[in-house]
Amino acid sequence: MNADDGIRADVGRMRRAAISLAAVAVLGGAGCAGGRGQVASPAAGASAIGAGRAFLERYTAPDGRVRRLDQGDDTVSEGQAYGLLVAAALDDTGRFDAIWGWTRRHLRRSDGLLASHWQRGRVVDPQAATDADLDAARALLVAGCRRARPDLRRAGVALGRAILRRETARRGGRLVLAAGPWATGQPVTVNPSYLAPATLEALGEMSGDGAFERAAADGRALVAAVARPLPPDWATVDAGGLVRPSGPPGVDAPAQYSFDAPRALVRLAEDRRQAGRRLAARAWPVFRGRAPGRLVVERGLDGAPAGSSQHPVALVAAAAAAAAAGDTAAMRRLLDAAQALDRRHPTYYGAAWVALGRLMLTTDRLRPCAR
């Protein structure tokens, strides 16, 4: 299977189970807010820290492996990257070092990227997934800043350069962020939720390489081309640069917003560029005024419900759209509802995005450093 094997397995099981940007800091300038994140309010900070600790304590083993306990106790590179981000944001140096150590020992490939899936003592899918690689790179930049560790910053930039080499493709004048090394052919396979503009621009500032900012700008344009107003889980880019929404790779299915695409709204809502935030805000009318219990995950790209699954990631995405649109009260309500839903029906993926949503939308604890 391809590099998104782990998350698609998660999606399948979830379906069967059916169960303000005020704090986003500008990445420019030296340092990283005095080494510790500043929060929009004490309550927002406490909630974000609490959600992060809950994720780490439940899903991280002492050796640093992030365990998908509801997925057969396997591990995906995405999960290791989530653990690194949360640990870096919380200044949990012990857990960060353990997670990064496990990741290096078990998942790092010869090209510097991360193998996507480990189970029962071995890698079962050596392919890489771009979202995990980007999230891990960001975590290394954040931890390197907070701890005054240039070696961690260098490791983050090195991972970023490997992403440019192996996980991008040029099509129709665009620098396309592909879903992984496996996805750079004809057409290029793209997962819009892998686009992380804040991470790409931080890598550009740290490295001095303008290709990172180009990838961010072209990624925003790609998402704008396929979001109607919701982005799809998957898309393709042909040789001429034409972008089309699609079903999952290798599956004859219509394009849909389901368990992958909500992450795109969170990553765009924390974008320091107005172009990204506008894309997230465009989705707010789909969710505005609706009770959290009625916000299903699966939707057409026009926002029409197409399923019945309830999951925290859908509520965190709605909160991101609210934040981008300036409705911070709705953002807070939706984040609280997402956390309450995860307490009732705990999952690795839900807990991860409750924590990351709070950290990205209500604090600057994941603000990477500039040079």
Image (cartoon, rainbow, N blue to C red):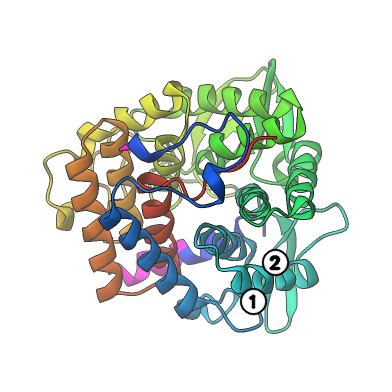
Q: Is residue 307 magenta?
A: no
Q: Are marks 1 and 2 in contact (CB under 8 Å)?
A: yes
Quadrant for the N terminus in the image: bottom right
Q: Position of residue 214 (x, y in %)?
A: 66, 23
Quadrant for the C terminus in the image: top right
Q: Position of residue 63 (x, y in %)?
A: 66, 82
For marks 1 and 2, the one nearer the N-term is: 1
Residue highlighted by disc 1: 64
Which residue is found at the position 52% from the left and 26% from the top?
Answer: 220
Which residue is found at the position 37% from the left and 48% from the top?
Answer: 39
Which residue is found at the position 55% from the left and 63% from the top?
Answer: 91
Q: CA distance from mark 1 to mark 2?
A: 7 Å
- Work out whether residue 305 or residue 202 is closer to the camera in this orientation and state it: 202
Residue 63 in view in this figure: yes
Above or below, comparing residue 102 to residue 315 in the picture? below
Rendered image: mark on residue 199:
none
Q: Quadrant of residue 92?
A: bottom right
Residue 308 in view in this figure: no
